[in-house]
Amino acid sequence: MSDPFISIHLDHKTFPSAAGPVRALSKIDLDVEEGGFVVLIGPSGCGKSTLLRIIAGLDLDYAGAVSVGGKRIDGPSPERGFVFQEPRLFPWLTVERNISAGFSPAQPDVRRKIDDLIRLVRLEGFEKSYPKQLSGGMAQRTAIARALYRDPTTLLLDEPFSALDAFTRAHLQNALLEAWLKHGTTTVLVTHDIDEAVTLARRIVVMDARPGSIRAVIPVDLEYPRRRVSPEFEATRYSVLRELETAYGAKEEVRHVA
Ligand SMILES: Nc1ncnc2c1ncn2[C@@H]1O[C@H](COP(=O)(O)OP(=O)(O)OP(=O)(O)O)[C@@H](O)[C@H]1O
Ligand SMILES: [Mg+2]
């Protein structure tokens, strides 16, 4: 692997609570190469969002060292686009102004960029709508377009497609892959969906719960776009499932729903 772009050496991350400190993450060592695509998957509460927030620079209160481009992260940066687990739009701004972060759509270059992104996330006709007029999935698509607007060098996405129907989800997975292949944006995405992980990732990081740590790193050396019906896809899917079964500590339950 070439020099790591994102370098994570986390001893631990602890949250205070009335019942005493809660250790959310423990001993995480993970490098992401420039232009890499890493997917984090693991049980609810294992610290995926916490880890993503640390990479984003939204949480600096941890023991260890996390750097991007060789520089320790000391706060959020427009270089790192973030799609939160819930959309978090500005309620007083229209869809297009949420996407352009307030820049006036009257400027031709802003207009062009907004229109491209609106097409990408399939929100034509809703440019002038306010967040309260959108469904959850539409709001999330706006948040994805907003993250892409600034052409970030790093894209961090926390379950970005979980509120979407199957077809919109597949479309946005393809759109994300296209943008990634074109711009080489270093991407870290969190999901609970094994197929999504195998469709997108170059490496899948399976996490253990309590406290969150890395259980397995599974490389996915399949060409894009990936065919979900191929034996190679199925084999990778099974490897992830096996690790997840152990991470959940609930073998039969997971096998039952898979
Ligand atoms: N602000 C906070 N204050 C206290 N504890 C927190 C805080 N944020 C997260 N935690 C705790 O840290 C642990 C990890 O939470 P986190 O949200 O990162 O999990 P997750 O893997 O993203 O879960 P999910 O899949 O449900 O989104 C949990 O035990 C949670 O209770
Ligand atoms: Mg989460």
Image: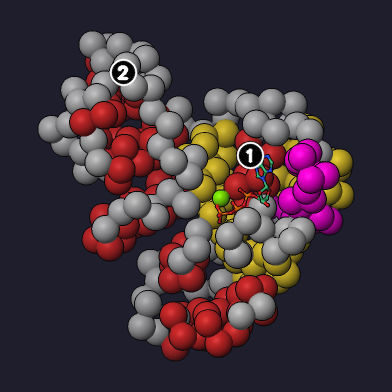
Amino acid at the residue labelled 1 = Arg
Task: Give me the residue at 16% from left, 36% from top.
Answer: 124
Check disc 2 and report the residue beneath it.
Answer: 93
The furthest residue to the left? 125
Q: Would you say the beta carbon of the disc 1 residue lies within 8 angstroms of ligand 1? A: yes
Does residue 169 belong to the magenta stretch?
no
Give SS at disc 2.
loop
Tell me what residue is drawn at x 45 percent, y 81 percent: 258
Q: Residues within 10 Å of mark 1 (few under 14, many from 20)?
A: some
**Image position of 76 (left or right of 146):** right
Q: Earlier in the sequence, mark 1 or mark 2?
A: 1
Residue 204 lies in quadrant: bottom right
Residue that appears at 40% across and 84% down? 230
Magenta highlight: main SS: strand
Which disc number belongs to residue 53?
1
Q: Which of the two residues, 187 or 164, is positioned nearer the viewer here?
A: 164
Q: Is residue 51 left or right of residue 221?
A: right
In the image, residue 254 lies at what x, y percent? 52, 80
Magenta residues, start to end: 13-35
